[in-house]
Image (cartoon, rainbow, N blue to C red):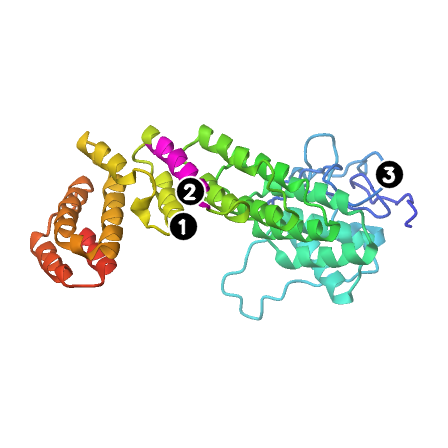
Amino acid sequence: MNTVREVEIPTGSMKARGPEVAPVTSGRADVSFEVSLSMGSTANNITEENTRRTPGEEQDDSLDDGSDGETWVFYRERKEWADITPVPQDDGPHAVVKIAYTEAFSDVYDYLRAVVAKGELSERALYLTEDAINMNAANYTVWQYRRKILRHLGSELEQELNFCREMIEMNPKNYQVWHHRRVIVEWLGDGSKELKLTEIIFSQDAKNYHAWEHRQWALKTFKLYDGELDYVDRLLEEDVRNNSAWNQRHFTISQTTGFTKEVIQREVEYTKAAITKVVDNESPWSYLRGVVQHCEGGLASVGDLWEWCQKMYDEGQCSPHLLTFMLDLMEDRMERQPDLRPSLLKRCLEEADAVGYVISLPPSRGQQTVALEMAMNSDNFTGVLTYIINS
């Protein structure tokens, strides 16, 4: 177990913490750094000293957070890092577009490269990765090395989860931090905190792909489906256009009850109610297609879908989503009832004209007529109807 020791802080330095000095930055690679001692570090102990400057020392505001006098200290100025020779980035002899890294950024990554080259797996190296991540949370090499250190030290992983959460809240669309979170959760064998975490992220962005992927992984890995459908219901009540929630509904049912005859009927009625609220909302129409495709009897074999669509159409509803769904229903009937082809194909042509009108496409009657004639004796109904709609 590491022993906390007082570290002699170079003039103009920040507070010391843990067995080694390890400042935490704001995660910005610019000239301004915010120092915090509550970033979810794996350090177990913190030692504090007052920050002082040498009399007459010129203050560099670009390295001061301006809050309580704490300042960033370059690693090259820290005595406890004197045994490490930094390794500068090698851009080759003729760098075409050299990135203008800040001095502090280069300092951190020069020492990180040296530590990685040395293969050092220590507490101070762990703190160094934290600074590097705060400056560039998308650097997957740093995350990987941090995991290597955590494993080697046998660090407290619950504290690492806290660090992950803070990084995710600051970088919600960062793939590397989500992957790191998943690995730590796998090591712990406990996904109980993941649903709450993703709910927090969805409150900021209900369609965050990384959060949804993580949630589905946690649900599937740890069998946490209880209450998931109720959660999706709440999301759709808040925003019926939330296509991510509709996708999650299909995922949850697929992983639990499956689409039995009873479930299909229930979901059809649920979706019809949602469509009635906002007919031009594409998401529930797509979901409805996905649901009825599970029915062995075809799209039109569930309830009164055709009559329901026809009623809306007769009442003057001309949403392209309604019209294309009606085309899908007619296509399915033609596949199953060849004797209905002539009459249904003519109706399909009418619907295709209506779709073209709704979405302001110029009619191409000649092409549609040719397609209709071809379809009369064709077995490729899907291709023909697609041609009609797109013509």
Q: Are marks 2 and 1 in contact (CB under 8 Å)?
A: yes
Q: Nearer the viewer, residue 373 or 246?
A: 373
- Compared with 323, 311 (above or below) is above
262 part of magenta stretch: yes
Residues in magenta? 260-275
Q: Are marks 2 and 3 in contact (CB under 8 Å)?
A: no
Say which amino acid is labelled 2.
Ile
Within-10-Å neighbours for mark 3: few <14, some 14–19, many 20+: some
Quarter assignment of residue 115: bottom right
- Report whether 230 appears left or right of 344: right
Q: Does any portion of residue 372 appear in the rendered image? A: yes
Q: Residue 274: x percent and y percent?
A: 37, 32
- Compared with 277, 6 (above or below) is below
Q: Nearer the viewer, mark 2 or mark 3?
A: 2
Q: Kindly state the secondary structure of the residue where label 1 is placed.
A: loop
Which residue has dot 2 on it? 264
Say which amino acid is labelled 3.
Thr
Find residue 47 and name its label.
Answer: 3
Say which amino acid is labelled 1.
His
Q: Upstream in the sequence, badge 2 or badge 3?
A: 3
Q: Are marks 3 and 1 in contact (CB under 8 Å)?
A: no
Q: Nearer the viewer, residue 48 or 237?
A: 237
Q: Residue 359: x percent and y percent?
A: 20, 42
Q: Upstream in the sequence, badge 2 or badge 1?
A: 2
Within-10-Å neighbours for mark 2: few <14, some 14–19, many 20+: many
In the rendered image, the quadrant that contains the C terminus is bottom left
- In whole angstroms, how far apart are the C-alphas of marks 3 and 1? 62 Å
- In whole angstroms, how far apart are the C-alphas of marks 2 and 3? 61 Å
For the point 76% across and 49% down, the residue is 127
Q: Nearer the viewer, residue 328 or 14?
A: 328
Quarter assignment of residue 309: top left
Which residue has dot 1 on it? 294
